[in-house]
Image (tube, grey):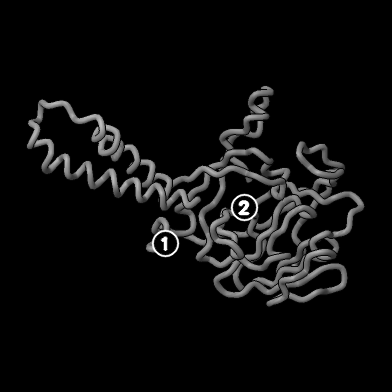
Amino acid sequence: MNFALILAMACLFTGLLWLADRLVWRKQRGDQAVQPLWLEYTAGLFPVLFLVFVVRSFLFEPFNIPSGSMIPTLRIGDLILVKKYSYGVRLPVVHTKVLSTGQPQRGDVVVFRYPKDESVDYIKRVIGLPGDTVSFVNKAISINGQPVAKTSLGASDTSGASRPALAFREQLGHKQYTTLNDQGAGDFLLLEAFPYRENCERVFGGMRCTVPAGHYFVMGDNRDNSADSRVWGFVPERNLVGQAFLIWFNADEIFSGQFSRLGFFE
């Protein structure tokens, strides 16, 4: 369901009725006359719908996390907010950029339209920028030949992980965050799913990719349980939706009295 299109059409329909009421119908019935019920529930909703449309299209949009690919940073059921203006102001529905406001940085958590099906939104972490050479060998990342700093945190007891996992503290640019790798498991992505070969090559123990201009290399923090750029390729700049920055609700955790994860995240 294209909610942005539905909201735009609702704004257009109620806006036309609101304008007609202001310019024509109100004068015909007199300013003191009661507004008809059908008009109250159509034109009367226009200011609210328009406000929601503007905020959702250009400022902030809520998203739900449906999978565990970003554990431990984001868990299934998290409701998050995304800054729509972080990487440019875009027209709703058609997604055309009309104003450049910035570019993703390594380590950013971004929402984007999945390149294989743009009706679906994905969320991953930016690892490689345009022109970068990203290597993923023996579950370790290198960018342009420089290993990404990584410190072991031992076994993870993170809720939602599908199998026993090891946690690592990783630093990419100015961002620090925690990643997971399955204990003793081979890399399922490299062993079972290696269909995307353009700009990439297999190397001993992993893969190496050069990010083309206007694209980004993204990965999930749950490294052995994330279908990402290692599998289906790069994210075009035009597919970017915005930067995720805030967890504002998780029903399971809140109803059990846990509030520690609510707020800003890396």
Please provide percent x and percent y for residue 155: 86, 42
Q: Residues within 10 Å of mark 2 (few under 14, many from 20)?
A: many
Q: Residue furthest right?
A: 184
Residue at image coords 22%, 41%: 18
* Residue position marked by numbered label 2 in the rendering: 123
**Residue 198, relative to residue 53: is it above or below?**
below
Amino acid tagged 2 = Ile
- The residue wearing badge 1 is 94
At label 1, counting other C-alpha atoms closer than 10 Å, the crowd grade (few under 14, some 14-19, many 20 or more) is few
Is 146 positioned to the left or the right of 114 in the image?
right
Quadrant of the rendered image containing residue 192: bottom right
Looking at marks 1 and 2 on the same chain, the residue that comes earlier in the sequence is marked by 1
Instruction: Left or right? Give the position of 265 relative to 6.
Output: right
In this rendering, is residue 197 above or below 95?
below
Q: Where residue 125 appears, x then y in whole percent? A: 65, 55
Element carrying mark 2: strand
- Which residue is depicted at the point 73% across and 55% down? 226
**Which x, y percent locates residue 228?**
69, 60
Q: Nearer the viewer, mark 1 or mark 2?
A: 1
Q: Toward the viewer: 162 or 108?
A: 162
Q: Residue at x 75, y 65 (%)?
A: 142
